[in-house]
Amino acid sequence: MLKDFANSLGTHRRGILAYYNYPISTGPLEGTNNKIKTLQRQACGFRDQAFFILRIYALHMTRYELLG
């Protein structure tokens, strides 16, 4: 199991080390994609695609929080 982990690190070594030169994360993009998917699930009653596109453009102003 430890050898598999070491082999995996060796395989991805260039990408891991490149992160330290260019610390770019895909976290914000993944969050935006998740918001679009959530909106798409809720959008089953929208009449036209133009309104759905406007809602996607307005996503940057929304916040999803756990309420409880």
Image (tube, grey):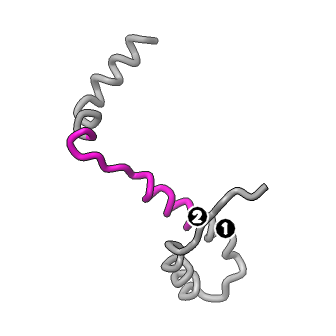
Would residue 1 appear left or right of 43 to someone viewing this image?
A: left
Asked whether the beta carbons under mark 1 and mark 2 sit within 8 Å of each other, the answer is yes
Three-letter amino acid code at the position of disc 1: Arg
Spatial CA distance of label 1 from label 2 is: 6 Å
3 is higher (above) or lower (below) than 49: above
**In the image, what residue occupies the spot 66% across and 88% down?**
47
Q: Position of residue 18 (x, y in %)?
A: 23, 39
Magenta region: which residues? 19-37
Q: How many marks?
A: 2
Residue with the mark numbered 1 = 41
Q: Quadrant of the C terminus?
A: bottom right
**In the image, what residue occupies the spot 49% across and 63% down?**
32
In terms of image quadrants, where is residue 35? bottom right
Three-letter amino acid code at the position of disc 2: Lys
Badge 1: few (under 14), some or many (20 or more) residues near its Cα, within 10 Å? few
Q: Position of residue 56 (x, y in %)?
A: 52, 76
